[in-house]
Image: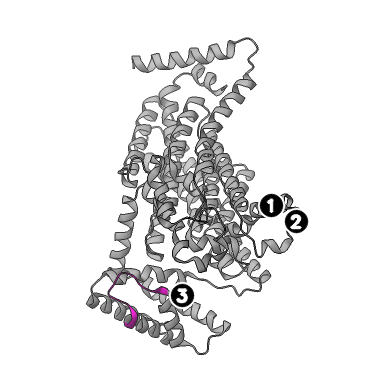
Amino acid sequence: MVELELFKSMWLRAFQCLRSLPGVKPRLVRLGATSVLIAFLLAPSIWMLSVIPPLWKDVDAYVQVAHPPGIGTILQYGPLYCFVARIPLYLGYAIDCIRAGAPFPTRDFFLHPTLSDLDVFVLLLSQHVALCCSAFYFIAVTSRLFLVRLLLVIVWAANPLFYAFAHCVGSETLSMILLLLVGATGLRIIRHPRRIPRKEWLLFGVLLWLCILTRHINALLAALMPLTFFLLSAQLVTMIPFTRSQLLRRWRRLRAREDLQKATVAVVIGFSCIALANISLRGLCHAAHTPYEFRVGFTFLWRLRFLATIPAETRNQLLDNVAKKTASPEVKKVISVLRETFPEAPNWDMTAFMRKAHASLFAPETESQEEKFNLVLNRTARAFLYPPENVFLSAAATDFERSREATIPSVVNQLFGQTTFYFSHSDAMAGCAPLFTFRDKSAAQILAIFKRHSYFHHRKSFSYNAFLFFWFTNLLLLAILARVRKEDVAALSSYATALTLVGLVMMVANCFLNEFQPRYTLPMWELTVVSASVLVGRTMECLFAPTHSWTRTLRAV
């Protein structure tokens, strides 16, 4: 305690001296403090833009930024990134045209972009700037104390996860940026003890809608605020039987009722955003003359790769049980083809299977039959998922365990690995041939970049499980400090818990619908990092701001 008081006294004197300097105004002090925080946040971005070539999320990224509006850019991937990313690409191409004295690109560029080094650089620059702005806004909302913000900024800059995705072409980057804004807006909402302003709900709804349009699985974020208020209400209800004061007991009942009302509002907003996103997809499909279809069955095919890892007898028994669940003869045919063509080796040729399954169902191939084939794939996925067999549940549980053992370096390493996809499938990414990332380079050279820079792979053994333990420890510490200081942190702890739980649920959903890949852990990592930042910020305030004078002094900075 003596050391803690000395530390606080030292910083207090330093800030008092700073503010008492002649000619130094509080506004300049705040500007200087903001500049320091932004400098820390931008440092990794400046370094990566100068040293690291742009990363590409294999052919998915190429489809998102280079293909015209259609099934891939609207239904398979979230359309928001596919279309918004073309704005900086257009700006970069326009600069190239100015340099060469060529006419400006027409609106057709947005339908069929032409990729160049400057195009991609402007895109990555916009992504890094957007990450800096969203991270700064979130950290500023997390705490008003400069020292706490500085600590969070330093830790944030030392984490390569978000910067690596900001340096990568792909929709997950925009999803990551929007999720930070969702986290900050949700934190602002739970800080209102009584009535929540409509503008806060509106902002949260808009951000949630944009998140869903970026990645379809982000629809699960609709559960964030309802879960927060349900947890908060449950805490109050649980404490009522142990409350002796009749007045306090009545107050807690009223607060619990208010929180349930807020949860109801949050549920309505969440479902409205999901519905609005669906309407937006249908509108985009209509504008692009593309039939709207639900494509979960196509994604689910990658989940079936686990069948190669189980014995043939177990696999055949599983397929028999799945076939009994459906009355559709088309689904039974797909399962039959699956049984016949599935190899013993772990590498399953997905394209060959789809061609064979399509040929067994329809002939000749037409657009209308493609729609029917997608419907058959959706029904096949439903047969596997409802209800799931024990073997399937075991595979999903194994992948979920692998996801919690994943480390940040393993996720970043996959981004470099997926960038090398071009060298073995250059025909699928023909427009990337002249780019700096791939021009006169090899897959080994790209992978060597990751190994060469320790920033990407420090602390290899720090897994998500370890970080989750740190998060839980911080939650307990905050609860103890709040009880000692008699402060109310129920809303904040409920929100932090909801963030982590939603991240875990998103990972579980991914394990059921797709095969495991380290990059799919990004939402789980990010939501838990956001949650931990909220807890750390509040815990630091409890530790280092016990007096109002101390709080006022640091808030001025």
Q: Which mark is residue 378?
A: 3
**Measured Cα–Cα span from mark 2 to mark 3:** 48 Å
* Residue drawn at x 62%, y 53% as measured from the top left: 119
- Looking at the rendered structure, the secondary structure element under dot 2 is loop
Colouring of the image: one colour
Q: Which mark is residue 96?
A: 1
- Few, some or many residues within 10 Å of mark 1 (<14, 14–19, 20+): some
The three-letter amino acid code for the residue at tag 2 is: Ala
- Looking at the rendered structure, the secondary structure element under dot 1 is helix
Residue 244 appears anywhere in the view: no
Coordinates of residue 255 in the picture (x, y in percent): 49, 40
Please, is residue 434 above or below residue 203 in the view? below
The residue under label 2 is: 102
* Residue drawn at x 51%, y 68% as measured from the top left: 428
Magenta highlight range: 340-350
Coordinates of residue 159 in the picture (x, y in percent): 43, 40
| 348 is within the stretch colored magenta | yes
- Few, some or many residues within 10 Å of mark 2 (<14, 14–19, 20+): few
Residue 318 appears anywhere in the view: yes
Can you say which quadrant of the picture contains the C terminus?
A: top right
Please, is residue 332 above or below residue 522 in the view? below
The three-letter amino acid code for the residue at tag 3 is: Asn
The reply to whether dot 1 and dot 2 touch (C-beta < 8 Å) is: yes
Coordinates of residue 317 in the picture (x, y in percent): 26, 78
| Sequence-first tag of 1 and 2 | 1
The reply to whether dot 3 and dot 1 touch (C-beta < 8 Å) is: no
**Marks 2 and 3: which is nearer the front?**
2
The residue lying toward the viewer, choosing from 529 and 497, is: 529
Quarter of the figure with residue 303: bottom left
Coordinates of residue 380 in the picture (x, y in percent): 41, 77
